[in-house]
Amino acid sequence: MGRKCLFLALSAAASQPSNTACAFTSLGGNVALGQRRQCTARRAVPTMIIGPAIRRMKEKEAKKKMPTASEEETLNESSGLRVGAGAWKWPPVWPYADELWLRPDEIPEATPSVNPMELINGKGPGLAVDLVEKPKMDTMAFWAENGADDTYITGESTEKLAAHIGYYLKDGMDVLELGAAEKSYLPDGLKFGRHVGVGANAVAMGRNSALTESMVVDLNDVTEEVEVNSEELRALGYEKFDAIIMANTMDFLTGPREVFKTCWRLLKPGGVMIVAFARKDAFSSKFGKAQTKMWTNYNDDQHLWVAGSFFQFSAGAEGWEDLKGFDISPEGSKSDVPLIGGLIDKVTSSADSVPIYAVQATKVQLSEDVNQDDPARSFKEQMALQPTLDERDKVLLAPRLGRAWKLAETEEQRSRILENVETLPAIYESLIKMDQFAFPFQLQAQLATNLCTDIDFVGNEVQIENLKMGLGLAKPSEEFWKPIGSATADMDPEDKVNLLSHIVPRFGGTNPAMDGAATNFLSGLRPAVAVIKGKCSNISNSDAQLVATELLAAEILKPGLSTKAEFAAWLGELTEGEIQEMIKTRKAYRNDAAEAMAEMQKIRKQMQEETEARLKAGREELIRAAEERTMAFDERTGTFREIVK
């Protein structure tokens, strides 16, 4: 029996009277001291074994639960501030696997089978896993059937949450409540100007006297990375509410980013959104079938940070500020001993209250104008709610767009850059598919920036389709992209990507002068390569193609600069030294891109190794738990029983 299983078994035994002891007592005889000690030992947790372990666990848990908020941050805040605004740290991309948003009955079944190749190679039986997909849960049907039940926690926990909400919300406010049911967690006497409830059960909301109006909405019906797919919520308008509260609802959300994006749009600038939740098992007996794997897999401390991440990955630091996490649990609601299998915590916690937490942030007013002194920040704000873009992409794009905006020579160019921020999701829909081809993130950002800064790029379907053909994500056209690919076959991939930013805007634009630009570029490419190779006898095919495409892009693809005849005359005047200098400058850029790619590959490899290590550890833990498990909880009797092996 492993140490954890031994501890659970002993703890379970300690909570139940011993049949042996009862038998001795019923005899009424004198039991020898040694016999009594022997019986007692079967029931009690041995102090000399468990005591030091409990002490170490308490110390470790106390360190984990130390507040990460400064004394200054606690001023003018409700009690229980646990995580201050400056303590949150986030990865550059959405960190959660899709499977974390599955409900228990949606999790695919793993069917083990023997791997024949393992047997053939003499390695013994191998384990191959076939995943059997499960149908999606009907969220609204579940809540229609179960949502009219009591969904409200009681006792001191309710009072603590109501006091916390009352600290930040005032009379006369217009408030939106997501996950509304039969009662709201509000202090007595607090009266809102408007209190709109959004829930999954009309009967439950009908019993809530605090609501001034209500609507049934499936918060799990979302448009990925955009919003909740609800006409009722859209009809509420934009920036209409002073505050949004969402209590004990986070555990049921399968599209949390989209819910938080929707809340950001509905909230007024300066308005607060408060997300509260109880201990992870507070509703598991009633509504466990609707809780996500994220909720059941993570503990309460992790839930605090997960809730904070929903703010970060919905509108970022540009859209939210003053992100804070609170532990507002009543005294006595949590055990001094860390949760082990749920047993000790349940035994020692108060039955009338449960631990409760809140994470909240304030909406930032985003400026529609570009800050002359800090355009990069302005572009970061403009990208705050854009779908498809990860935080990593926004960090790379913002300074590039800001620099391009500063270098723009006309207001028309600046306006187009600002307008083209809206095209970034469509661009990145293609670029993210290039990740598997070791296409560095920095180079992706540079290509996207170059496209956005081109006056003729509008991000329409024709241009995006040509972008895909140029990237090799769609079948290349016979009349243009196929011959372009042949004529630039020796160019490095990075140089071809840069060429795309010159060519793609020439298609599908509104400028009539562009109609023949791409055709002239193609017809002049092979002759230009031949001229350059004639001037530089030792030049490689790749360098000759690079110089030719760069010169043609600069002179022929831009209307009004050079005619074909003028370009040919200018090209004939170039010296070998001038051509070699062009190559030298271009290679410096290429080396920078290579270093960026090496760093990206290093990060990717590390992430892959970490993922594989977690999966391996999880598999080993499941096997070990199955082998070492000696006790099981019997739901019929409410006691633990020994597993007979």
Image (cartoon, grey):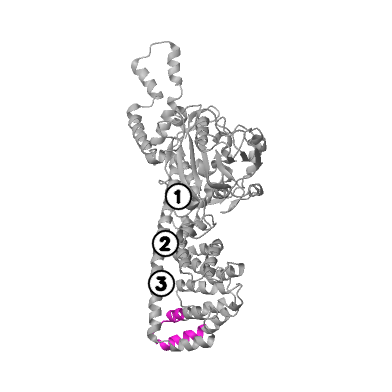
Q: Position of residue 315 (x, y in %)?
A: 51, 52
**Residue 262 vertical placement versus 518 (above, below):** above
Residue at (46%, 86%) from the top-left corner? 571
Q: Position of residue 382 (x, y in %)?
A: 52, 58
- In primary-sequence order, the first of circles 2 and 3 is 3
Magenta run includes residue 256: no
User: How far apart are the alpha carbons under marks 2 and 3?
Assistant: 15 Å
Front-lying residue, 329 or 509: 509
Please give the label number shown on residue 615: 1
Please give the label number shown on residue 590: 3
Please give the label number shown on residue 392: none
Residue at (47%, 84%) from the top-left corner? 529
User: How far apart are the alpha carbons under marks 2 and 1?
Assistant: 23 Å
Name the front one of labels 2 and 1.
Answer: 2
Q: Position of residue 245 (x, y in %)?
A: 55, 40
Type of the residue with mark 2: Met
**Magenta region: which residues?**
525-547
| Quarter placement of the N terminus | top left
Q: Position of residue 364 (x, y in %)?
A: 50, 50
**Residue 513 vertical placement versus 220 (above, below):** below
Type of the residue with mark 1: Leu
